[in-house]
Amino acid sequence: MFDKILIANRGEIACRVIKTARKMGIKTVAIYSDADRHALHVQMADEAIHIGPPPANQSYIVIDKVMAAIQQSGAQAVHPGYGFLSENKLFAEALAAAGVAFIGPPANAIEAMGDKITSKKLAQEAGVSTVPGYMGLIEDAEEAVKISGQVGYPVMIKASAGGGGKGMRIAWNDDEAREGFQSSKNEAANSFGDDRIFIEKFVTQPRHIEIQVLADSHGNCVYLGERECSIQRRNQKVIEEAPSPFLDEATRRAMGEQACALAQAVGYASAGTVEFIVDGDRNFYFLEMNTRLQDEHPVTELITGIDLVEQMIRVAAGEKLSITQDDVKLNGWAMESRLYAEDPYRNFLPSIGRLTRYRPPAESAHEAAVVRNDTGVYEGGEISMYYDPMIAKLCTWAPTRMQAIEEMRVALDAFEVEGIGHNLPFLSAVMDHPRFCSGNITTAFIAEEYPEGFEGVSLPEPELRKVAAAAAAMFRVAEIRRARISGTMDNHERTVGSDWVVVAQGISFGLRIDADRQGSTVTFAEGDSCRVTSDWTPGQSLARLEIDGTPLVLKVGKAPNGFRIRTRGADMKVGVFTPRQAELAALMPEKLPPDTSKLLLCPMPGLIVKVNVEEGDEVQEGQALCTVEAMKMENILRAERKGIVTRINAAPGDSLAVDEVIMEFE
């Protein structure tokens, strides 16, 4: 077994590998760019080596720099994580030439299956059902338009070396094919150093289901069940689960056996994932094979009890698999929610900045439930514009799917993140969505259920009443603390009133609080009541309560006459008033936001890549105005209505902050 391994990656996956290596008694070496000098993976590793400037194409994916770090550290093996060099044949070959073990598949398997064009051709030759498309190289946008027309719209434009949603676009017409080809090509070049593009038919109403395989160099291969990855946005997975709520045992076995046969056909050895698209009749089609560890591997670990990183290390050391297919048992259900640094209220645009507060829910594991959080950040750390915006992968396990969902709901509510935009509200909204809870999902779920983007959550009245009761009970505690009441003062007994009016989401709840040492009984004006218990004290940002014995977790912030409360995806101001204060508050005029309808504002911190118009141009609704790059993704900003460009304040190459004015209109 190895004594020391180098992790050729960063962020949460580097931290994840370090944890398993530490458990196995193996020392670790981290590499880092200027932007990651104080990163968590650098702090966790036994040693760390600097490899260059922040852009990945000047540091993490420069093979010579990584090889120099390996030589300097004396590492015997390298784990590539995912992304960066994980599926780069040249890197695997360089390691082999240097006598360093690659904790991944052989170079020939990477070449055969890691390249999406080659893998689809091999799958076709092996008789595997594949999605129709054009696997040849595409030279320019006009050829992309021609091929798209031949394949038939809609089409998926994909980077051959792509992954993680980078370099992928769906095109429904010639204009989108032309734009999508160029953006995919640019993203692929920036993220992977490989700008080859291919096109395939986009299957409508699909499910994205993948099979985890594990193979050794002695000819053994097993499949570890499937993962449902259909909740996607911009072709990037957001929520995954294992097993799939859609597959039956016969389909699972057929997909698993086909995945293993494909892996063995190319001499695969390590952990890998064979991805399929599955239609409503459970027909499945090979999409691609990822010759690396997947982001969503924790859910497979949770339902099988198998540490995939450990297995990868053992296979790389030449060991035989210690498990057979008969040993693989799927136990319970697991969910994974990807926490991203992005603003769901601004169409999920990337957000960067400092994590002024980062308090994940406590990790725990017992027979009834598991909470796991894979992360690469810490409170006070900075989210950089140079890398993927993932902050953490929050996972839960329970014996049944609905129990796993409920565990996730509570864990999401208990996750505290401040200082940047994040998608916690959206993740919570999905967990409560009836369609998701039913398991009736496809890769079009987000587009279909949130066609106008995510605009927040409005709690149904029964849930809102619980929040109102909790807020009133907490406000009473805060008032007692504020007034420093302790029974009597200067022989004059002072008390806090019992009658209150709580206003939330535009609804007023008149109620009365009767408190005792164990909690409070809250009685609404209509006569119904509930019991509120909690150990919350003023100043705490997280309140854990029980309403009639049912857990309720609230993120609590200060606000005049009440609180800012976030729970179950809802983010709202909750006012708590005396009856007289409520009467007066209802008369206050509402403050209107400023008019920005004649301005194009930069929606996220980023780099201006292209400006499509000039001052004086007349633009039409939907016309491309400019392209902003942030976190390795290109975002095309379009005109919301017809107008004339009167002023352009930014040029290609400019770095802008959020809400900076790019151009003005009349």
Image (cartoon, rainbow, N blue to C red):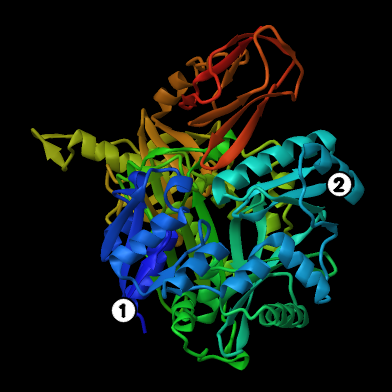
Which residue position holds label 2? 147
- Which element is circle 1 on? loop
Identified at 47% across, 76% down, the residue is 368
Nearest to the observer: residue 599 or residue 540: 599
For label 1, count other residues whose C-alpha is less than 10 Å away and answer few (under 14), some (14-19) or many (20+).
some
Say whether residue 638 is left or right of residue 490: right
Identified at 16% across, 42% down, the residue is 487
Q: From where the camera sits, is residue 460 visible?
A: no
Residue 23: percent from the left, percent from the top?
33, 77
- Which element is circle 2 on? helix
Identified at 69% across, 70% down, the residue is 245
Disc 1 marks a residue whose amino acid type is Asp
Q: In which quarter of the image is residue 143?
A: top right
Residue 422: percent from the left, percent from the top?
48, 43
Which residue position holds label 1? 3
Say whether residue 310 is left or right of residue 129: left
Residue 124: percent from the left, percent from the top?
82, 70
How many numbered marks appear? 2
Going from the N terminus, do you reach mark 2 or mark 1 first?
1
Quadrant in which the N terminus appears: bottom left
Quadrant in which the C terminus appears: top right
**Marks 2 and 1 in Cβ contact (< 8 Å):** no
Q: In this view, does 547 lie above or below 509?
A: below
